[in-house]
Image: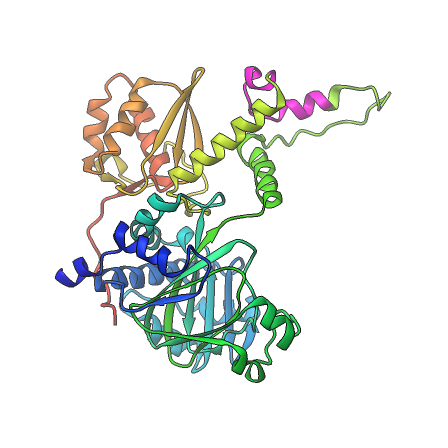
Amino acid sequence: MMEDTKKALTKDWWLLFIEENFSFTETKVFKDVLSESLQENLYKGVKEMLQSRINRLDISNGFRLYQKGEEIGDSKVRKLIRENKLESQESIESYCKRIFGENYGIITNYGERHSDILAENVLEAIQPLFDIIGIPPWGVELTTFIGNYGWTPLGIHTDQRGENVLHFHLGPGKKTMYTWNEDVYKEVGKGVSNNKDVEPLLEYAQKYEFGRGDLYYMPWNKHHIGFSGDFSIGVTLWFNNPTKCSFSKLMIESIKNMFLKDDMNIIESQLDYLNNEQTFNDFIGTLNISSKTLNEPLVDFLQYTYKEYKKCLLSNGGWQNIPLRHHKKVENTNHCFPEFEFKKIVGSNVFKITHEKEEDRLLVYVRGVRLSFKYFEGLVKIIDMVNTGKVIEVQDVIEEIDDLPKDVVVYFLKTLVNNRGLKIQEAPLAEIQFQ
């Protein structure tokens, strides 16, 4: 524990971090700063993420496998992993070697979506940094790099505009990053993106080597490539500071995601097409927005959308991507979380559930999702109970909220569990040790 205390990523440490990378403008390696407990938790999180991906065959979005530098297509990846699940007692390295061979690389996006362990531990580590600089407008997200693939298969490249990256290196092997400033690479590399002809350009690069327990920071505008000769795992955190145009597109997309009803009724052909207003009424009718909001000026509606987006992002701790739900839909039946009434539940100390009253509706913000319920004071009491972070018996909640039917209380709790705002307390499973 003394080592963990010495390596705590405190507010003072993050202030030093900002000073040494010149306010996020310069690449920098911070040696031996990740505590053993943080490394172990991140390893468990990476394994949880891989199990979610592999055991559910979820590899169509943000999962890339490379063998000997060549990307493998989804159909072949599915064939490799369909009958080869990642078991709880098998290490990541032994599994990958057994299934993918001697030379491979796995790059996975949206780690926060597939692992609560990753989402909670990384967020706790960087919360003091958020307290200093604030949350990026587009939030943050996680990508993992796994394997012994040699040169990063993407070639020499730059990251998305505005997306600074922080790399938590879990090892055990070391990794080397080579970077080129924009003007240098424009001259010696002709500005070629995804350039795989690396060797002739190395003499013009800056070299950064880091190992297990190190933290590596790099701003978005550096041409770069990594080299991993030995097996290693890296968890990278992306600070998504979008362009103004990109953020505006996000706000427009938020209108669709938050307010558009899934109305599948057919709109018929129209006489007097230009002057026929029925299609407009159909359009307005698909918007799940109160008449009061619709009748206000457009700028008020856009600001309302903007505020709702931010409330959702904050309820997810700043993570851009929401976690996977347990079920597509929760009905008040036992097939979703069987024997739920006899379970224990626990709220998160990291992700607090927030709520607001809007006319006769209760809006609930949980892990990046905006839910709407008919307003009852009892539902607010439930949120207050679970936000304590204490383990609670479902039966105790039912007895405490005696002004609502049991089915309503159970359905509300199941919905919060389904959206990862609550967890069902289970006996812990034996887990392989971090190596």
* Spot occupied by residue 89 in the image (x, y as percentages of width and height): 26, 68
Residue 254 is at least partly visible in this image:
yes
Res 369 seen here: no
Residue 311 spot, x, y in % from top left? 43, 33
Query: What secondary structure do most residues of the magenta stretch adopt?
Result: helix
- Residue 47, by quadrant, is bottom left
Q: Is residue 368 above or below residue 80?
A: above
Q: Quadrant of the C terminus?
A: bottom left
Query: Residue placed farthest to the right in the image?
Result: 272
In the rendered image, residue 291 lying in the magenta stretch gets the answer yes
Question: In the picture provided, is 412 more to the left or to the right than 83?
Answer: left
Residue at 57% in and 69% down? 73
What is the x, y in percent for residue 10? Answer: 25, 52
Viewer-nearest residue: 360 or 164: 164
Q: Residue at x 53, y 53 (%)?
A: 162
Would you say residue 258 sits in the magenta stretch?
Answer: no
428 w.r.t. 78: above or below: above
Location of residue 410 with respect to 61 vertically, above or below: above
Q: Is residue 233 above or below residue 372?
A: below
Q: Nearer the viewer, residue 187 or 120?
A: 187
Q: Position of residue 268 (x, y in %)?
A: 77, 27
Magenta stretch bounds = 280-295
